[in-house]
Amino acid sequence: SEFQRQAETRRAPAYQHLRRTLQHAIENGEFTPGQALPGERELGKLLALSRVTVRKALAGLVADGLLVQRHGAGTFVAERIVKSFSKLTSFTDDLRARGLDPKSVFLERGVGEVTPEEAMALNLSPGSQVVRYYRLRTAGDQPLALERTAVPQSVLADPAMVGNSLYEAFAACGIRPARALQRLRAIAFDAEQARLMQLPEGSPGLFIERRTFLDDGRVVEFTRSFYRGDAYDFVAELHTE
Ligand code: 16G
């Protein structure tokens, strides 16, 4: 297979090469969520690599959240989506990195006058116009999140500019988000949200609010996301001050 061929033509530190090869195999769906990997010894034999090399490569992918190791059972492709809490990525980025198919189902899309809450979050004066989206975000048909987004109309002139991905629409317009402020809290999906997410009412979720800024300080996005509680792991590297 492609995966075997790539792993065999290895160079530089072998474990880094194997790590990248396995990462690509996961991204391309050659290995799918929940699938068991061959054991360390078997992988080593298959690829003519030492067991130490294999172990190091697997450890790196476990640290990245792409693999999980279950004691006594082996190594599996992670089923939850591991999302960095310190990288400014989009829903589309996060899913593509896992070889999943990100989609938007538009529940609402339009232009209107800012609400006081949106005006505060976006640093807009009352009476300004915003473009609004309410989207169900899915991996294929599987609902993963509900997102309400407001963008100043001075940033996106026409709501139709967002087809599937907001950040792709930004990129297409030459808008480069530089940083974001995010807050997160636990919620329970209410009846309406649960219906849209195809979950039992009261299922746990994560409410994440994001304000995204340009280098010049302008706010380009105010998004309130409701992520499935059982589908994501949030990770961040912490430093002492
Ligand atoms: C993520 C962001 C959200 C952003 C969206 C854009 C979090 C918690 N939220 O869901 O603020 O609007 O990505 O994704 O990460 P898109 O480019 O796929 O539309």
Image (spheres, grey):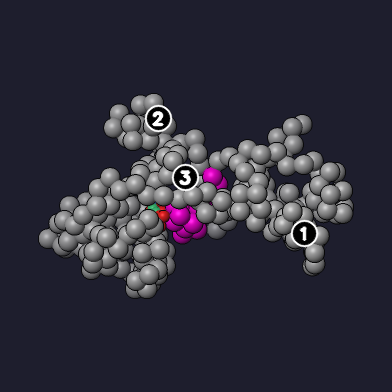
Does 166 lie within the magenta span?
no
Q: Nearer the viewer, mark 3 or mark 1?
A: 1
Quadrant in the picture for the C terminus: bottom right
Q: Is residue 110 left or right of residue 238?
A: left
Q: Label 1: how many residues lie within 10 Å, few (<14), some (14-19) or many (20+)?
A: few
> Residue 184 at x, y = what percent?
41, 45
Mark toward the start of the polypeptide (3 vs 1): 1
**Residue 199 — which label?**
2
Dot 3 beta carbon under 8 Å from ligand 1: no
Quick one: label 3, few (<14), some, or many (20+) residues within 10 Å? some
Q: Can the viewer see residue 236?
A: no
CA–CA distance in space, label 1 to label 2: 42 Å
Query: Which element carries disc 1, helix, strand or loop?
Result: helix
- Give percent across and percent down for residue 3: 73, 55
Disc 3, SS: strand
Outermost residue to the front: 1
- Left or right? Give the position of 42 relative to 194: right
Task: Return the disc, 2 or 3, that comes first in the chain's sequence.
Answer: 3
- State the mark number for residue 139: 3
In magenta, the rendered stretch is: 81-94
| Identity, as a three-letter code, of the amino acid under mark 3 | Ala
* Badge 2: residue crowd in 10 Å (few <14, some 14–19, many ≥20): some
Can you say whether 134 is above or below 73 in the image?
A: below
Q: Residue 140's x, y, as percent?
A: 46, 44
Q: Measuring 35% from the left and 31% from the top, which residue is drawn there?
A: 194
On the picture, is 119 further left or further right than 77? left
Residue underneath mark 1: 5
Work out whether residue 50 can be spotted: yes
* Circle 2: residue type: Leu
Q: CA distance from mark 2 to mark 3?
A: 15 Å
Magenta-drawn stretch contains 91: yes
